[in-house]
Image (cartoon, helix red, strand yellow):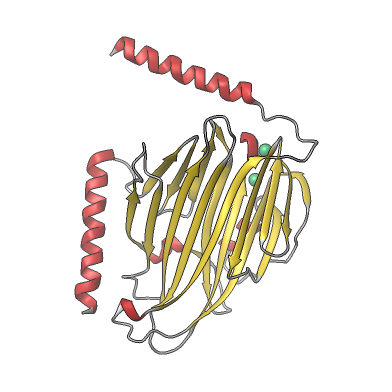
């Protein structure tokens, strides 16, 4: 049962990888979501993780990704180290794919951890400055020998308005991160389960903690901190009950982390308008290149 199930995943993964490779001749797990005024770039099989979120032509994000640590001894690791078993893009009917499901650790025998991650992009109308990414992370205990203690981390490095320095970042109420720059405001709220720890930081301090060789917990600095290359992170200290039968994925126990990341124009006074002309020139340059290619082609 176990082997037939896992074999199925492996072969589906190989099949998807082969199709994508044939179609793109590039990294099969680097995907792009598109909706409305927005796009999101995620390399599902790379420690970089999500490396793009573009809204009305302006890129807003340098990196977002997920780390885990089993027990109290380190180091932390990115979820892609569990092995990407498969990914599936979902098109809701309008141009581009709006949703991706990525599945990690199902065939990884060295740990009891498996993770499903879903990103759903909902763009606003052109020029609205609005966009939304819903993220659902289901963390599984594959073991039937006992509960699994796992620390799960989300790390976010927004560079709002396309510039690395941002105006402010803070954690409000222990579960809402708010980052601002120009006239832009991003907020992300995690309601269930509430994060156990958090920290705001200056790049690359939190990233260094997550990538070094020892165990680290977030430092509970809620900010606000100002006017630098700002980042934030959440940490959930999960204890997941034992599976009924480790050979039967239907009996694996899990905890679901669900959170919503939203960008809008900041309604509080003081933010200067985002530098639209630069984006406009870039768009015009792209149009010019496209026109030249058409003429030449
Ligand atoms: Ca900025
Ligand atoms: Ca560490
Ligand atoms: Ca940043």
Q: Residue at x 44, y 14 (%)?
A: 288
Task: Decide if residue 209 is in sight here.
Answer: no
In the image, residue 45 sits, relative to residue 104, either above or below, namely: above
Front position in the image: 91 or 219: 91
Seen from this angle, which residue lies furthest bottom? 145
Kindly tell me whether residue 49 is visible in this rendering: yes
List x then y, in percent, for residue 7.
21, 69
- Residue 109 lies in quadrant: bottom left
> Who's the residue at 32% across and 41% down the image?
26
Residue 160 occupies quadrant = top right
Q: Is residue 112 left or right of residue 132?
A: left
Closest to the observer, 30 or 139? 139
- Residue for point 32% across, 47% down: 28
Q: Quadrant of the C terminus?
A: top left
**Which quadrant of the figure contains the N terminus?**
bottom left
Q: Residue furthest right?
A: 270
Q: Position of residue 260 (x, y in %)?
A: 56, 55
Camera-nearest residue between 95 and 78: 95
Q: Position of residue 239 (x, y in %)?
A: 53, 80
State whether residue 180 is above or below residue 175: above
Q: Position of residue 5 (x, y in %)?
A: 23, 72
11 sits left or right of 168 in the view: left
List the single residue furthest toward the top: 295
Relative to 290, does residue 245 appear above or below in the rendering?
below
Report ligand 1 position as a quadrant.
top right
Q: Quadrant of residue 94?
A: top left
Q: Residue at x 49, y 49 (%)?
A: 50
Q: Nearer the viewer, residue 122 or 197?
A: 122
């Amino acid at each position: 049962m176990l082997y037939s199930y896992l074999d199925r995943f492996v072969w589906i993964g190989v099949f998807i990888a082969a199709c994508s490779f044939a179609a793109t001749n590039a990294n099969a797990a680097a995907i792009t979501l598109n909706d409305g005024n927005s796009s999101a770039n995620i390399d599902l099989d790379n420690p970089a993780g999500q490396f793009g979120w573009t809204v009305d032509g302006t890129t807003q994000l340098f990196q977002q990704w997920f780390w885990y640590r089993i027990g109290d001894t380190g180091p932390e690791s990115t979820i892609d180290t569990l092995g990407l078993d498969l990914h599936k893009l979902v098109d809701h009917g309008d141009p581009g794919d709006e949703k991706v499901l990525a599945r990690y650790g199902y065939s990884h025998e060295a740990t009891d951890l498996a993770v499903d991650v879903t990103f759903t992009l909902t763009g606003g109308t052109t020029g609205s400055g609005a966009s939304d990414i819903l993220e659902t992370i289901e963390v599984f205990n594959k073991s039937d020998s006992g509960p699994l203690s796992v620390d799960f981390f989300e790390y976010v490095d927004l560079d709002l308005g396309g510039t690395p320095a941002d105006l402010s970042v803070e954690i409000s109420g222990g579960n809402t991160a708010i980052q601002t720059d120009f006239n832009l405001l991003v907020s992300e709220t995690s309601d269930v389960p509430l994060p156990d720890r958090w920290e705001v930081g200056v790049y690359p301090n939190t990233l260094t903690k997550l990538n070094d060789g020892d165990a680290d917990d977030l430092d509970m600095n809620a900010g606000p901190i100002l006017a630098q290359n700002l980042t934030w992170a959440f940490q959930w200290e999960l204890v997941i009950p034992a599976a009924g039968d480790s050979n039967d994925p239907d009996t694996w126990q899990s905890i679901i982390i669900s959170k919503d990341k939203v960008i809008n124009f900041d309604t509080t006074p003081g933010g200067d308008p985002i530098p639209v002309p630069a984006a406009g020139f870039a768009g015009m340059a792209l149009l010019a290149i496209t026109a030249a290619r058409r003429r030449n082609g």
